[in-house]
Amino acid sequence: MFSKAVFDQKKLEFIKDLQLKRFSLEPLYLDVISQFQKNWDKERIDFAVMYDQSLQSKISNRLWKTVDHFPKEMMLQFMEMSPYIVREVFDDLFNEEKDITGRVGRFTFHCDELLNMLQEANSTKKYRHHYHDAFVASLYLMLKFPDRYCLYNPDAFSKAMALLGARKVPDVIPIDNYFTLMRTITKFLSEDLGNEYPEYAGKPILALEMVYWLVGAEKA
């Protein structure tokens, strides 16, 4: 999709900016991945407590709570209402034997259904949204499989592809293509970074960081 020659030049500039501290990698991503990996256990009886513990961070909660964005709070309400259904929803999302596009689509659909159930059970209260879009699905995937996934940011990705010499950037980036290209970019980056950032080795969040560097976008 992108020009390898342009990418190689930009890659060297990116690495130089990292080395000269002109661009910093976001520590929050590694922090939340570490916390999730330590705590996530789908067999826990107290599933909601486990979920809450898995999404703690000593750095920031902005991935889970910002202005008009409360996915964690909504998921906890789903768990209080139907913990067994929610457990199955996450089992499906994390099933690597199934197609990623289908998993993300079903995850959002299941959250739609859970929201409808919650609304029916609490008719006096109006729920605006469950906040579990493809971005939040990608966040869960990144936490569970950090060597395969990163945050889904198609707008920044499209801009980055144009800057990397892509001849044609589609208006809609299929999520499976997105993750495949991010893994490819990560592989190319790892070849030159060596042992400078071992905690990022093989993790597509490194490719995401280069995307943010390219387009000057605010990090999620």
Image (spheres, grey):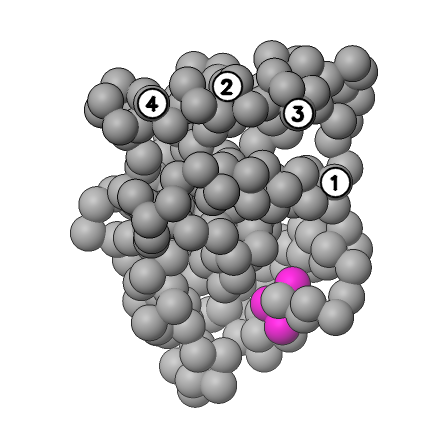
Spatial distance from mark 2 to mark 1, Cα to Cα?
Answer: 21 Å
Residue 161 visible in this rendered orientation of the protein: no
Sequence-wise, the earlier of marks 4 and 2 is: 2
Out of 60 and 178, give the one closest to the viewer: 178
Residue under label 3, please give it.
4
Sequence-wise, the earlier of marks 2 and 3 is: 3
Spatial distance from mark 1 to mark 4, Cα to Cα?
Answer: 28 Å
Asked which secondary structure carries label 1, the reply is helix
Residue under label 1, please give it.
177
**Relative vertical location of residue 96 with respect to residue 157 in this rendering, above or below:** below
> What percent of the width, then of the height, locates residue 168?
80, 16
- For the residues carrying marks 1 and 4, which lies nearer the camera in this image? 4
Residue at point 44%, 37% (across, down): 192
Sequence-wise, the earlier of marks 1 and 4 is: 4
Which three-letter amino acid code belongs to the residue tagged 4? Lys
Sequence-wise, the earlier of marks 3 and 4 is: 3
Asked which secondary structure carries label 2, the reply is helix
Residue under label 4, please give it.
16
- For the residues carrying marks 1 and 3, which lies nearer the camera in this image? 3
Residue under label 2, please give it.
10
Label pair 3/4, CB-CB below 8 angstroms: no
Spatial distance from mark 3 to mark 4, Cα to Cα?
Answer: 18 Å
Label 2: few (<14), some (14–19) or many (≥20) C-alpha neighbours in 10 Å? some
Residue at point 41%, 72% (across, down): 40
Q: Which residues are magenta?
A: 89-93
